[in-house]
Image: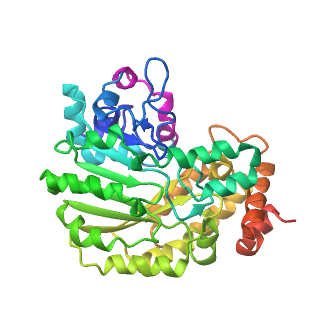
């Protein structure tokens, strides 16, 4: 029954899902380009607007009708881009995950927050190269150094990113919907540093609905929530912890500034040894300019960990690090190298299929922007791209 929807344009998330952004806005899902706004084009915010009000807004009504009319809404272009190269998109993944529920919601036009994507602020202890102040409080000081004339703007991100610690309409309304919720996806910032998400989970336990709920985390691997593992997570149907691992060793630490590779590896082993019966260990890798050439080396480490699932995601922003922007000559070198890897072939192939495709929009003056982006951050962080990625520096001559 679900197969017919996988090949269509229809997505059930406008009926079944809602995302809170790290800066306190709402989106239909994590890949939607833009935020949910009212008739005056003012953004709905987590501080002022409750879940039901947002889901039943004119904006969401219009989005649902576009899907029913067979259209491809502009804000959903990330999914169409991935599907064009044969990669399983978020839209398709959610049909596989909850096809029956999605079908019923659309057929009966029932709008309810069965899936809530929680980005509870931008508090984080890392400042990853492919991230930004939107999702990492640690990035703000660097952005001020890079753009001192915009310091008020960057400081505003940390102010907005602190929304879960203020009295807000979203957290007040979660309790009204716990009986409808079936899935939490909790990211950040670094979600395991954000205590408010544990408060939300406790509400689900108190209401007696936790055994019906799956909880998925994307974590940078630097935190180990001992109390949650003992007192909160056992009450839920399933806990998925996906470790964001984009590379290994020094390359990992360069891409995820402030992280220590040895400590993250130890934490992963600690999670595996926790004894939590409803726990699923996963690895999530986001392919980008820095790691695409080394995916085969990462695959060997992932195999040693033997996670329940390895998901290879694709980077859309910042566009300068999107692998589709790479020159064809280098793409061919990556393809030749990675195709020799004899493990995780299907996972790697999905990444290679995306790499091979031409970008929907070429970044103007891409090469100069790439050099500027890498060297400017290297300078303020006292890091060295050429030392960490000698093969890439030889190819792209960042420090020639």
Observer-nearest residue: 331 or 177? 177
Residue 299 image offset from top left, x and y in percent: 50, 72
Residue 239 percent across, percent down from the top left: 27, 63
**208 displayed left or right of 382:** left
Q: In this view, which residue lies farthest toward the left?
A: 208
Q: Main secondary structure of the magenta part?
A: helix
Write down the region rendered in magenta: 58-81
Residue at (73% x, 60% y) in the render: 377
Residue 220 makes an appearance in the image: yes
Give the side of residue 124 with respect to residue 368, left or right.
left
Horizontal side of 203 relative to 255 (left or right) equals left
How many marks on residues? 0
Query: Is 294 situated above or below 207?
Result: below
Q: Which quadrant of the rendered structure holds the N terminus?
A: top left
Vertical arrangement, residue 91 with respect to residue 220, above or below: above
Depth check: give the residue in front, 273 or 313: 273
Asked whether 72 falls inside the magenta stretch, the response is yes
- Which one is nearer the viewer's eye here, 316 or 210? 210
Q: Quadrant of residue 14?
A: top left
- Report the coloring of the rendering: rainbow
Q: Decide if residue 119 is in sight here.
A: no
Q: Nearer the viewer, residue 212 or 224?
A: 224
């Amino acid at each position: 029954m679900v197969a017919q929807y996988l090949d269509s344009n229809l997505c059930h998330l406008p009926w079944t899902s809602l995302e809170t952004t790290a800066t306190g806005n709402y989106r239909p899902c994590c890949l939607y380009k833009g935020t949910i706004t009212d008739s005056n084009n003012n953004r709905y915010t987590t501080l002022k607007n409750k879940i039901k009000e947002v889901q039943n807004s004119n904006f969401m009504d219009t989005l649902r009708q576009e899907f029913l009319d067979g259209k491809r809404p502009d804000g959903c272009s990330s999914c169409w881009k991935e599907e064009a190269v044969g990669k399983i998109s978020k839209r398709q993944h959610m049909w596989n995950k909850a096809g029956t529920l999605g079908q019923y919601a659309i057929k009966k036009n029932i709008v309810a927050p069965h899936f809530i994507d929680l980005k509870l602020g931008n508090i984080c202890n890392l400042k990853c190269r492919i991230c930004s102040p939107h999702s990492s409080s640690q990035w703000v000081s660097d952005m001020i150094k890079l753009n001192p004339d915009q310091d008020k703007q960057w400081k505003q991100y940390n102010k907005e990113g602190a929304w879960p610690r203020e009295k807000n309409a979203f957290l007040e309304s979660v309790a009204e919907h716990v009986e409808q919720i079936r899935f939490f996806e909790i990211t950040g910032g670094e979600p395991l540093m954000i205590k408010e998400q544990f408060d939300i989970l406790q509400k689900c336990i108190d209401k007696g609905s936790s055994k019906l709920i799956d909880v998925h985390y994307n974590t940078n691997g630097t935190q180990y929530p001992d109390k949650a593992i003992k007192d909160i997570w056992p009450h839920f149907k399933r806990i998925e912890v996906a470790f964001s691992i984009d590379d290994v060793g020094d390359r990992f630490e360069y891409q995820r500034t402030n992280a220590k590779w040895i400590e993250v590896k130890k934490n992963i082993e600690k999670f595996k040894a926790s004894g939590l019966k409803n726990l699923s260990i996963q690895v999530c890798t986001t392919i980008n300019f820095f790691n695409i050439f080394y995916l085969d080396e990462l695959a060997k480490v992932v195999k040693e960990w033997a996670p329940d699932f390895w998901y290879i995601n694709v980077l859309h922003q910042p566009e300068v690090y999107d692998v589709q922007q790479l020159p064809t000559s280098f793409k061919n070198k990556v393809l030749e190298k990675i195709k020799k890897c004899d493990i995780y072939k299907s996972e790697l192939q999905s990444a290679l299929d995306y790499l091979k495709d031409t970008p929907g929009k070429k970044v103007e003056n891409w090469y100069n922007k790439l050099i500027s982006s890498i060297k400017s951050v290297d300078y303020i962080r006292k890091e060295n791209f050429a030392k960490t990625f000698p093969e890439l520096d030889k190819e792209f001559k960042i420090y020639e």
